[in-house]
Amino acid sequence: MTARDQELFSTAAITSFKLNGQFLAIAEELAAPAGLTAAWWQVLGAVLAEPLPVAGIARAMGITRQSVQRIADLLVDKGLCEYRPNPAHKRAKLVAATESGRAAVQRINPQHAKLSHRLAEELGPAEFASIVAALTRLSVAVDAITAEDRNDGAL
């Protein structure tokens, strides 16, 4: 590893931490009028397309299974999600959004759309798409090397 590689890695990590904080603050602001928190919105968003087991949500979101379980239980208690039988696994039930959960997320969409549009205008649509693609590639690369390191016992 060169000094430049290490500097780039550190800068990418620090920038990602800052972006995470910025995105979480924005998500809290967008979710609050719908009666949600950013974490509730994150879990609900993961199951809008299809029901998923808690472990699947955790993998998709990059958060712990225990955190997702706690949030899923709260969402079920509030009627925003429900547990369904999982044909692939008897004990790992599927988490599914209810109509109330879908309606809560729909209430976020107008402000989300406005903010998305403002960011696209600020960056330009092509650069915005390029940044998203680069962040996606970075995430895939980090997954690949950390999986290798876990398999080799380095992490």
Image (cartoon, helix red, strand yellow):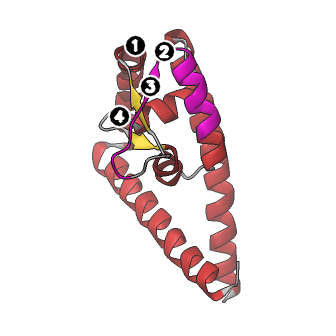
Residue to which mark 2 is pinned: 79
Q: CA distance from mark 2 to mark 3?
A: 7 Å
Residue depicted at x 60% and y 23%? 74
Residue to which mark 3 is pinned: 82
Q: Which residues are magenta?
A: 69-88
Q: Is residue 39 visible?
A: no
In the rendered structure, the answer to whether residue 80 lies left or right of residue 14 reads left
Q: Which mark is residue 87?
A: none
Q: Are marks 3 and 1 in contact (CB under 8 Å)?
A: no
Residue depicted at x 36% and y 47%? 128
Residue depicted at x 69% and y 74%? 7
Q: Which mark is residue 121?
A: 4
Q: CA distance from mark 2 to mark 1?
A: 7 Å
Q: Is residue 77 magenta?
A: yes
Expressed as whole percent of the image width and height from the top left, the position of residue 42 reads 50, 34
Q: Are marks 2 and 1 in contact (CB under 8 Å)?
A: yes
Q: In the figure, 59 relative to 82: above or below?
A: below
Q: CA distance from mark 4 to mark 1?
A: 33 Å
Instruction: Say which of 120 and 43 sits in front.
Output: 43
| 3 or 1: tag closer to the N-terminus | 3
Crowd around label 4: few <14 · some 14–19 · many ≥20 (10 Å): few
Q: Which callout, 4 or 1, points to the residue nearer the camera?
A: 1
